[in-house]
Image: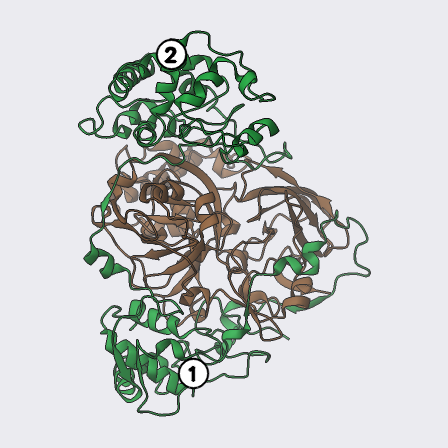
Chain colours: A brown, B green
Amino acid sequence: MTDRTESQASSRRQFLKSSLLGGVAIAGAAASGRAAAAGEPLITEVQEWNQYPGEGVGTRPYGQPSQFEQHVVRKTVPWLTADAISSVSFTPLHELDGIITPSGLCFERHHGGIAEINSTDHRLMINGLVEKQLVFTMADLKRFPRENRVYFLECAANSGMEWRGAQLNGVQFTHGMLHCVMHTGVRLKHLLDEAGLRTSGKWILAEGADASAMTRSIPIEKALDDCIVAFAMNGEALRPEQGYPLRLVVPGWEGNMWVKWLRRLEVGDQPWQQREETSKYTDLLPNGKARRFTFSMDVKSVITNPSPQSPITHGKGHTVLTGLAWSGAGAISRVDISIDGGRNWKTARLDGPSFSKALHRFYHEFDWDGSELFLQSRAMDDQGFIQPTKDELRSVRGANSIYHNNGIQTWHVGKDGVVENVEIS
Amino acid sequence: MSKYREVLAAGLLGLLASAGSASPQDAAAGEKVFAKCKACHAVGGGAKHRVGPHLNGLIGRTAGTAEGFRYSPAMMKAGEGGLVWSEGTLKPYLVDPKKIVKGTKMAFAGLKQDADVANVIAYLASFSQGGAEKKAQAAPAAAQPPSQEKTASTKPMVPAPAQQPGVAVEPAEQTIEQVSSSSAEQPVAAAAKSAGAQPSQAVGDGVVLKLGRTATEDEIAAWDIDVRPDGVGLPVGHGTVSQGEQIFDEKCASCHGDFGEAVGRWPVLAGGQGTLQNDRPEKTIGSYWPYLSTVYDYVRRAMPFTNPRSLSNDEVYALTAYVLYLNDVVQDDTFELSNENFTAVRLPNEANFTQDDRLSEPHYANRRDPCMSSCVPGKAQITTHAAVLDVTPEDAGTDDSEAPAAGIE
């Protein structure tokens, strides 16, 4: 309240309002000669927002979240990278609910900064093993049949800083390279049909128009299956940070393949072995070998609240636990919750739409007795895959594979309700 | 809905006109006859198998060979015996299917009027060979996703009328089916085992809308700069180690260090060989990268970091040669790398990359229902605590966000 008043002190009208309020309060007390009404002043006293009209329509032509939600933002971990131009910011998962991530909060991962491209200046080229090498404008692309799909996007390196043990104290940092939006676009297959795919075409190369000219090789089977060339997210044009005006959607597969500022699709008969599929996004194993083309994202879940950035502040009693679950293999069929570090489990309640390769929201309501808790969630998908423990992963992969860490997360809840990222035995 | 009907009506008119012009005498009448077939067969843009196979490209097709359709053994045998659908072979079949192919699954008594047979064959012929493509372009109505904006968006989907006079839309029934079934409910997570499918309907496969324009050779050359390990994509050019050293000192060393050892958290380019099994592996071009082509490709497309696409092809050859030298892959500083000798150079770690075999890991194989009670003995004990962000050791990160930071012992 104090902050807000100070921030608005320059407004003469606000100043007048404050004076008036003060005057009324004093006058009221003097007139009644009684003690203030019993109860919360927020209720017993007429509040400013109830007493004076607010801003009219049109003062916020593109609406923003409430000024009281200004802390709900993407955050960075500056020491992670050499420079913000090629870096990452994280989605504040602990501040969100449902399954759709607001466009402005979707995590960012840029390799050459945000390309600012006018949609009228953007072109998409299809070349290589096709009958007709084509160039499309954005207007051309919008004349193809459109599709709307809700899919999660997870960076393969999400939770990558946690391989050696609990490190970052917040779900935003441990799991925040994740978002889920509804994309609108054109099935990639239709574009390839338009160009006339040759039977020798086995891979496509997707390329971005940004300063990193990001490239990834994608097997043709995936390209023809469910990939979308998208120009909208959550009902409006893509945000620049998400590849405006055009990005590739590669459902269930690692986020790096969802090439932003998509300008070119080349059809070839073998993969191109680009930087981001050889030196990066390959999974080093303890024997010195490295897995390549580990495209699909495994079944995973995390409790978003309570979590280190969202402690329990209400003390013991009825408590709502919630979180997210997802799988690159399909839909989530079940999420189990443990409050004792995996000794005993209960099945959580899934709520909201259930789409294949999309986030799923789960809840578990319980009566907290005020004792120490070790919270865990364990997801299962409709293909029968079960989220493993971090120890199960490490026993096979060691601690240097960086990517594809879908292990079960543990949050420790202290008796004071403070939550910390831990690992347990 | 009334507006929608208008669109359909217009489409049907177009269909009649088009069919008439494509096959002057019969096809339009054949389309009416085909109403008897439509319960089981689809034809035209986006047509899929139903009870019977789709009939696009029927003329000239060997009997029993439409991909993805489960034929009767009799029909497949007929095809193997040489039955190819033509006007001549279709005629007797359509008059009495079971007589011509004994054991066919097609439960249709046959057409009794010779004119009907001839007309429906003419109609089907318009979806074969040259005719098929024409009709396929006419599929916009079927090709659109079901949505409220359907009527509004129908118009622009129709290919340019000047080139395609009177193109047809899909048969009316089919379009209406799509609309009526488009109100798919969102699956609710708590409710359903069968959840997960995103509400959708097939939008025309194989449809060619004649959108976009042909890319020019120069345009393709300007953007298609990717290079593969087999040398495909390499431009003509050359550069030596010592030339590369000069360019490196000037344009690269400020981030990557004088010898590729890196400044701060910028990527280390050299060294680290033999460390991949260490507790702290050092992944460099020499120790980790499988292919030299990736170096050339990446430097050309994305380096220097603040000014990509500014290096000449020869400069990229020289820098690539210098990186080989820094990594002891070549020892001679007069070594010249060119498009001629490029693929002869191999990086040391090429053989150590494997395909994705995650499914072989034990926890993937275990798809049984997981343990629900008393799964782990004893009380949980904390083994590692998260570091508070601002005390995480400075040397924790490396070149990229995906690098693991230091663990807490």
| Disc on res. B32 | 2
Q: Which residue was labeled with disc 1?
A: B270
Chain for mark 1?
B
| Disc on res. A219 | none
Report the Cα–Cα distance between label 2 and label 1. 74 Å
- Is the residue under label 1 in contact with that under label 2 (CB below 8 Å)? no
Position of residue B322 measured from the top left corner of the image (x, y, whole percent): 34, 84
Give the camera-side residue of A100 and B105.
B105
Position of residue B174 measured from the top left corner of the image (x, y, whole percent): 43, 20
Q: Is residue A415 left or right of residue A78?
A: right
Q: Which amino acid, by three-letter code, is at mark 2? A: Lys
**Residue B31 in which image quadrant:** top left
Q: Earlier in the sequence, mark 2 or mark 1?
A: 2
Residue B267 seen in the figure: yes
Residue B149 seen in the figure: no
Q: Are marks 2 and 1 on the same chain?
A: yes
Query: The N terminus of chain B lies in which quarter of the figure?
Result: top left
Front of the two marks 2 and 1:
2
B58 to A388, vertically: above or below: above
Position of residue B79 measured from the top left corner of the image (x, y, whole percent): 52, 31
Q: Secondary structure at mark 1?
A: loop
